[in-house]
Image (cartoon, helix red, strand yellow):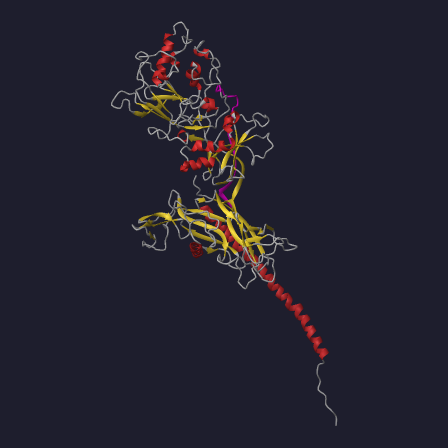
């Protein structure tokens, strides 16, 4: 019987078929999977590009609609145990510490990492709207109270003014209550089963101050739902850790700070993806993949930066100092006291002052001033902030690190805020206490201080005379502004004066009338020219005030004092002269404001020198001769020399001529003068007052970053797939001008 056999594949045949199948699947399916990955990467790149474009357009539009971009100062903070000053636009991020070889430290610890330009605050324009008697805001659409509104709602109020709403763009953790975790590149990986927790970009609208009940009174006060407050109850707007629940800067406890952060989270909107998008880039070595670090602090680059536009060496413009209708003697010598740049909103300003007569090729005339914030600012023995320094290019030092401090601008500003009785003197004293520059005659001649208004982009080189005085001495009760004041003296004429014996510089001739009477009497009785006054034109004998020698109310010398050697002058039109009324009538003798004239002053009038005038090289041209001119030195003020004390002041800044009719004395009383003084000027001889040919005024050159023109640098960094550590980057840049910027 024949045996039947079943046909079948051998194991070799099966293995062969399976091998061929695997090869075919590899050749066909693997490219399909790879194409999916490539498609996903392309989609991620396109999405990043589109999202980045929309974001930059939105940010640019909001910058253009704002009235200001906040952030020009510096904030004292502690970073990793060290006290430093940070720009107010910086944030402090929390990232894992690393070992010297760039690996995440075990056990895990966190470090403070500074992210510059990672925050931008926009001040929106004020809006027109209404609120009821209880301070509740009314919706203009419905006409009813809307309890969700925290600010007026409506059209922008015209003219445009700053509103109470602040728009903040900032970088923060997607969940600030968990540590940073990037499982995609493995550089700072938090080895846990948690989802990624990357830094994202937020946008939020808040009101730093809200209308609320404070101690039984409805008023605007700090919005403590979002901001900590300082000792004066003002909101702290520049806390670089405002989004860090583990740190508090004021009187809040950790629990309260966590509540603030939760309020920010509820209010803020993430404008990037909340997953797979990271707004910080960790720097590392591509070959070894070791994280770059300094003392265990990883180095990063924030992928969104709101940078002010940098401007270098811009000459500051100045208005015309002497205008038609405001003529005065020596108008050609009057220099402007205000200088402005084309853009405002300064940050990191450096100001160079090239004085009149500056010559770079002359070692004796190439010194200039530089205003800057010292690199060691805040440390013992160094300025507290912005100061004006004298710099000599012939020295070996760097202009940004060396020089002699002349004026502490920060101390002056603090004085204006109430820290000192006399702010200008405080600014001078603060610098002099560190450098002793007041003993140097050359530096006194170069001295040209100023105060800067960073928001408006303005340099003001003038100061109020009421800001000069001794901070240890209170002003007189009758003169609380500590202004220069002189006594009129007796209401007598040269004919009615009872005693004209003695020298003109004696105390009994200190009054305005008394000294006039004495000089007139000397001239009238000098019939033989024995005193050297016979040939003097009597129109040269004045009732006058010499502000150069009249002290402040507390006895402090004023800036116009000749022996101090400052190039000070008076800002035209800034003076106020109050003296007894000379017009007969019911107000006679009461204080009135005198009127300036350019000719010979009459009753209730005065004539003033704002700056030094060209003085005669020989005073005999005025009719003076020996012995009146004996011993006269034009370079040195001598109160006991007739020419130096009486006639030379007629050509100096601060000389005020009053009604000099010998038959009409000034009524009894005091004459008080208020004015602004400046040190900016033109090239002028300090002794003779003569102006050189082609004289030039002081020139200001400013380096600054302007928040009026913002640059937005945005990089969208996404991780489209988890099996590859290389992210997709798309960088976009935009520039936006604050169209409603108020200057």
Left or right, residue 189 beside residue 145 = right
In which quadrant of the rendered view does residue 104 lie? bottom right
Q: Quadrant of residue 398?
A: top right
The x, y position of residue 58, in whole percent, is 48, 51
Q: Residue furthest bottom?
A: 1
Which of the pair 644/304 is nearer the observer? 644
Q: Position of residue 667 (x, y in %)?
A: 30, 20
Task: Give the vertical position of 82 relative to 529 (above or below).
Answer: below
Residue 17 picture location, percent across and down: 70, 75
| Farthest residue, direction left | 586
**Left of 74 or right of it: where is 139?**
left
- From this viewpoint, is residue 113 visible? yes
Residue at the extreme right: 2
Give the position of the C terminus as an image quadrant: top left
Task: Decide whether residue 734 is among the magenta residues.
Answer: no
Residue at point 68%, 70% (across, down): 23
The reply to whether the magenta stretch includes residue 697 is yes
Can residue 89 be seen here? The reply is no
**Where does the N terminus fall, quadrant-wise?**
bottom right
Residue at x-position 49% and y-position 28%: 438
| Residues rendered magenta in the picture | 687-711
Q: Which of the two residues, 743 or 570, is positioned nearer the viewer here?
A: 570
The answer to which of 628 and 199 lies nearer the viewer is 628
Residue 361 lies, in percent from the top left, at: 60, 26
Q: How many marks?
A: 0
Against 643, residue 160 (above or below) is: below
């Amino acid at each position: 019987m024949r045996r039947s056999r079943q046909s079948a594949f051998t194991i070799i045949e099966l293995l062969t078929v399976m091998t061929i199948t695997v090869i075919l699947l590899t050749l066909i399916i693997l490219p399909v999977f790879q194409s999916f990955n490539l498609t996903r990467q392309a989609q991620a790149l396109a999405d990043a590009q589109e999202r980045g474009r929309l974001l930059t357009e939105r940010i640019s539009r909001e910058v253009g609609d704002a009235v200001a971009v906040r952030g020009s100062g510096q904030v004292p903070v502690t970073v990793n145990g060290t006290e430093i000053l940070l720009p107010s636009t910086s944030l402090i991020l929390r990232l894992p510490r690393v070992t010297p070889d760039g690996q995440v430290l075990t056990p895990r610890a966190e470090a403070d990492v500074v992210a510059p330009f990672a925050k931008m605050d926009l001040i929106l324009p004020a809006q027109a709207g209404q609120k009821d008697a209880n301070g509740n805001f009314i919706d203009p659409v419905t006409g009813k109270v809307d309890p969700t509104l925290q600010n007026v709602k409506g059209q922008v109020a015209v003219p445009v003014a700053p509103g109470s709403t602040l728009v903040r763009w900032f970088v923060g953790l997607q969940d600030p209550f968990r540590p940073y975790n990037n499982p995609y590149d493995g550089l700072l990986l938090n080895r846990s089963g948690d989802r990624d927790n990357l830094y994202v970009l937020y946008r939020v609208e808040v009101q730093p101050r809200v209308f609320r009940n404070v101690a039984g009174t409805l008023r605007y006060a700090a919005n403590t739902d979002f901001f900590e407050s300082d000792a004066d109850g003002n909101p702290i707007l520049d806390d670089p850790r405002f989004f860090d629940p583990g740190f508090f800067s004021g009187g809040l406890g950790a629990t309260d700070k966590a509540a603030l952060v939760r309020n920010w989270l509820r209010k803020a909107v993430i404008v990037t993806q909340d997953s797979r998008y990271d707004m910080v880039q960790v720097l590392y070595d591509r070959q070894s993949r070791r994280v770059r670090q300094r003392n265990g602090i990883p180095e990063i680059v924030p992928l969104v930066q709101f940078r002010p536009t940098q401007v270098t060496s811009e000459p500051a413009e100045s208005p015309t100092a002497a205008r038609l209708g405001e003529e005065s003697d020596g108008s050609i010598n009057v220099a402007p006291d205000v200088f402005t740049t084309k853009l405002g909103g300064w940050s990191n300003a450096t100001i160079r002052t090239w004085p009149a007569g500056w010559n770079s090729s002359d070692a004796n005339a190439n010194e200039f001033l530089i205003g800057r914030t010292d690199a060691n600012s805040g440390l013992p023995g160094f300025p507290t902030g912005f100061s004006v320094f004298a710099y000599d290019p012939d020295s070996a030092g760097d202009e940004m690190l060396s020089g002699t401090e002349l004026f502490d601008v920060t101390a002056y500003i603090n004085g204006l805020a109430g820290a000192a009785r006399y702010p200008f003197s405080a600014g001078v004293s603060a610098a002099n206490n560190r450098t002793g520059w007041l003993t140097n005659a050359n530096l006194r001649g170069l001295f040209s201080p100023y105060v800067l208004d960073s928001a408006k982009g303005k340099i003001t080189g003038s100061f109020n005379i009421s800001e000069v005085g001794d901070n240890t001495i209170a002003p007189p009760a009758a003169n609380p502004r500590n202004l220069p004041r002189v006594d009129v003296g007796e209401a007598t004429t040269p004919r009615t004066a009872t005693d004209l014996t003695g020298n003109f510089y004696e105390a009994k001739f200190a009054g305005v009338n008394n000294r006039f009477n004495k000089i007139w009497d000397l001239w009238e009785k000098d019939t033989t020219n024995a005193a050297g006054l016979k040939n003097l034109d009597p129109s040269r004998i004045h009732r006058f005030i010499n502000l150069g020698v009249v002290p402040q109310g507390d006895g402090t010398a004023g800036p116009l004092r000749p022996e101090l050697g400052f190039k000070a002058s008076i800002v035209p039109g800034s003076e106020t002269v109050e003296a007894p009324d000379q017009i007969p009538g019911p107000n006679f003798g009461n204080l009135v404001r005198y009127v300036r004239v350019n000719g010979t002053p009459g009753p209730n009038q005065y004539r003033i020198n704002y700056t030094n005038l060209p003085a005669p090289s020989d005073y005999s041209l005025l009719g003076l001769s020996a012995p009146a001119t004996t011993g006269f030195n034009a370079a040195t003020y001598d109160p006991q020399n007739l020419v130096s004390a009486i006639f030379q002041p007629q050509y100096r800044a601060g000389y005020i001529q009053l009604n000099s009719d010998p038959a009409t004395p000034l009524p009894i009383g005091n004459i008080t003068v208020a004015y602004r003084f400046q040190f900016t000027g033109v090239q002028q001889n300090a002794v003779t007052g003569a102006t050189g040919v082609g004289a030039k005024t002081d020139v200001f050159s400013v380096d600054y970053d302007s928040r009026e023109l913002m640059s937005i640098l945005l990089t969208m960094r996404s991780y489209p797939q988890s099996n590859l550590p290389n992210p997709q980057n798309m960088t976009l840049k935009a520039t936006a001008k604050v169209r409603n910027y108020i200057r």
